[in-house]
Amino acid sequence: MRKKRILLLSEGFGKGHTQAAHALSTQLRQSSAGIITRVIELGAFLHPTLAPWVFSAYRRTVTSQPRLYGMLYRNQYDKRPGRVASLVLHRIFYSQTKAIIKQLKPDLIVCTHPFPSIIVSRLKRAGLNVPLFTVITDYDVHGTWLESAVDKYLVSTPLVKDRLLTCGVPEKRIEVTGIPVHPNFRKAHSKELIRQEFGLKAMPTVMVMGGGWGVFKKEEKEELLTYLASWSKDIQLLICLGTNEKARRQLLEEEAFQHPNIHLIGYTREISKLMDISDLLITKPGGMTCTEAMAKGIPMLFYSPIPGQEEHNCTYFQEHGYGQRITSLDMIDHWFKLLLENYPELAKRRTDIREGHNEDEQSCTFAILDYLAQSDKRSYIQASSKTPLIQW
């Protein structure tokens, strides 16, 4: 029997969208031996030379002109993608998408970024007969996600579902599943082995994320990071800089970051392990990173949310008790003193976060597998109805 083929399409505008695609891909393959998956960052796949330039320009705009980005985000907040915008995306960047789909012959397409969802929706309106699921990877919905050809939206919370309903999406096309995270973030790893692997001490540990895009701007480094480093005698700091090797080298050269309790970590696939030994996470409120942290139960402090989706995420996380936005260095003092002087209370918060974020880790997977199973039933009934009855 032919295995079911699921094509997951993402984009490189931030790592979270593709992380969600890979997480869902892993869950699907682990849940059924009858599933084949393929994850593609569509723009980079079609334009390996042009795409990095486009993504770099986007990053520069977000980090250097956040107010401009926020203004554009809010201006288009309630607006669906127009035909002209869809056509421009298709002609300039995604004109070969139909050929990819024809070659791979997927039984289902899952998009974790709005751009591929726009393109596949356009192809469906033109006659493509492949079901389309769209996973919204934040805790709010921008108008760019809204497409009439999407067969099912998989969303993070009931609030996002309500937002889609107010935008006219039929309820039967929305399912609250949470954002998929890799199964490693649901596992508890050995803290002792992790510390041995990374050369870390058994002491209060704070993880800092968000440097991969160079978002630790000069003023943030001087104020936030340098202040954090001043606590290194009592607090172990794991500063994760992702692929931003330039920023890592710069920090390594500064005396303030040369303390043995400060670890400047480059790109790693072991974030789930590092979260296991971290007592507090300081991060930007990206949907994927924070969902992974909630799965681990780590309290969070947020800095410099990007106007738009990160601001909405930040509001959601604060309202539900998963973290706080840093409004002054006094807040860091409060949390670090809590970590040092009242660790049981912080440990209880970790348990509360994990239990409060108790969504089924397989919800997205089950929604997809159930849809495929129902499709098989429908196909069987349709085929049977066309078969002449045998007369005895």
Image (spheres, rainbow, N blue to C red):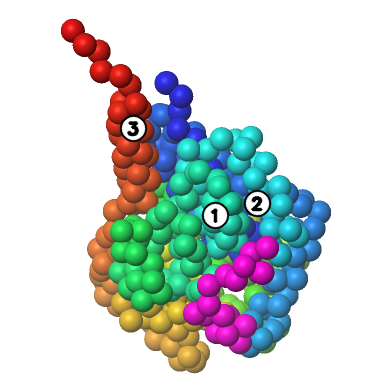
- Relative placement, left or right, of 144 versus 321 is right
Q: Residue at x 45, y 33 (%)?
A: 4
Horizontal side of residue 352 vs 288, given as left or right: left
Identify which residue, 38 or 211, lies in the foreground.
38
Tell me which amino acid carries mark 3: Gln
Q: Report x, y in % for residue 212.
A: 64, 66
The answer to whether residue 304 of the structure is visible from this angle is: no
Q: Which residue is mark 1?
A: 125
- Residue 55 in the image: x percent, y percent? 71, 64
Q: Under tag 2, what secondary structure?
A: helix
The reply to whether callout 2 and callout 1 are in contact (CB within 8 Å) is: no
**Percent from the top left, x then y, of residue 46?**
73, 49
Would you name the residue on which mark 2 appears?
A: 42
Kind of residue sitting beneath label 1: Arg
Query: Closer to the N terminus: mark 1 or mark 3?
Result: 1
Instruction: Specify the segment rendered in magenta.
Output: 70-87
Task: Please identify the residue farthest to the top as the structure is shown.
Answer: 392
| Residue annotated with mark 3 | 382
Secondary structure state at the residue bearing disc 1: helix
* Circles 2 and 3: CB atoms closer than 8 Å: no
**What distance separates the C-alpha of mark 1 from that of mark 3?**
23 Å
Quadrant of image for the C terminus: top left
Looking at the rendered structure, the kind of residue marked 2 is: Leu
Q: Nearer the viewer, mark 2 or mark 1?
A: 1
Across and down, in percent, residue 149 comes to 48, 57
Which is more foreground, mark 2 or mark 3? Answer: 3
Q: CA distance from mark 2 to mark 3?
A: 34 Å
Pick whichever of labels 2 and 3 is earlier in the sequence: 2
